[in-house]
Amino acid sequence: MNYYSLNKKAPNTSFKEAVIKGLAPDKGLYFPEAITPLSKDFFDSIEQLSNSEIAYETIKQFVLPEIPENELKRIVEDTLSFDFPIVELNKNISSLELFHGPTMAFKDVGARFMARCLGYFNQDNTNEVTVLVATSGDTGGAVANGFLGVKGVNVVILYPSGKVSDIQEKQLTTLGQNITALEVDGVFDDCQDMVKRAFLDEELTSNMQLTSANSINVARWLPQMFYFMFAYKQLKSKYKNIAFSVPSGNFGNICAGMMAQKLGLPIIHFIASNNANNVVTEYLKTKKYNPKPSVQTISNAMDVGNPSNFIRIQEIYKSDFELLQENLSSFSFSDEETKAAMLEIHNNYNYVADPHGAVGYLGAKSYLKNNSNCHCMFLETAHPTKFLDVVEDVIETTVELPEQIKSVIDKEKTSIKIDAYDDLKKYLLRA
Ligand SMILES: *Cc1c(COP(=O)(O)O)cnc(C)c1O
């Protein structure tokens, strides 16, 4: 499959180049040249297929032939080494749990898939890459874990010192091998600025192949289609009208769901659930798209003022506002509403949601008010213990730490402290 740049000022390129580059030379996001729906038979018999089989059928048209069939099957199977269970809260709402991976964040799937693709492209040691990521928490851990030990890929993670949770910091700083954590004396925006500057620095880019590992990269974005397929498989015989409420930040996840719908997945509606960072909620109300600086909330992985994947959504709907409105609703919720929802979910259903999932739950409820004939799944994007302080404070109960979290707590942190861009550059140009 070839990809074009949404800025339309760069040549079309292969899957391989799109993954290695991340962003097109004209700074546009890559988008596949064609989207071919899967057969009716695939959806009719989906309950008989394993998750790996479903994932392979879903992604193959976007990857073949640059990764051959057998390799792609192996990559998909390796990526999906955990479950994606659904917990039904009532006949209208359920939680699609995407947090059973190694770092307990839904980003594990995209990170693992992308890492394995890069590993394949570098198997003859000709395509060594350095993955540079800035993280405010979850992305860094998922990327570090997903890329651990992948040959020919060096991962450099920048995180703001003292601004990520203890558990998140351990997930970033205790792996060793090809993973380096740079601890930045500053805030997340400082980390992000340094990364952006590095991508524009010719002295660096002429010396090394730098790439990003956020949802801008097609290899991190597209595997997220799998969740929606797996969810459909589990609930198709029980409910007819299925909608998804997706807690959204950069809109990569929900945009992947829309791609799954393009492939023929019968979804009746999407709900983009936002915290106070409500650019898209406002857009659907006013038809005006006004990016603004992000504001801090308790669902911090969604604190995004200018969602990078929204331009892909516009491409899917050919910038047809009415068509988009028919398919997508969006609601925005305050931290107070989110906390009240966490309490409600705990009291009514004996279920513990993290702040992001709780925003998704609220979006589902808002949509159901006028659409009570459907079943709405909210995506539970992180395990509640990753936001332990807020969760335990709100529901006034202690939550048990799962194995994946326990296993990093006692490990020793290793990081390199930096405070300015020159430190990053020096580090990258060392050796
Ligand atoms: C990244 C993240 C999101 C937002 O996903 P997008 O694809 O950026 O919209 C939501 N919840 C959690 C826990 C995340 O880590």
Image (tube, grey):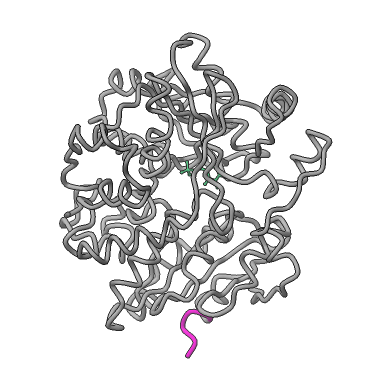
How many numbered markers are drawn?
0
Residue 210 against residue 329 in the figure, above or below? below
Q: Position of residue 403 (x, y in %)?
A: 67, 58
Segment tinted magenta in the rendering: 427-431
Q: Which quadrant does the N terminus fall into?
A: bottom left
User: Mostly what secondary structure, the magenta segment?
Assistant: loop
Tell me if 361 is positioned left or right of 306 in this view.
right
Residue at the location (69% across, 36% down)? 352
Residue at the location (37% across, 74% down)? 129
Q: Position of residue 248 (x, y in %)?
A: 50, 37
Residue 102's quadrant in the figure?
bottom right
**In the image, farthest residue toward the bottom:** 431
Q: Position of residue 42 (x, y in %)?
A: 23, 38
331 and 225: which is toward the camera: 225
Residue at the location (65% across, 36% down)? 353
184 and 43: which is toward the camera: 43
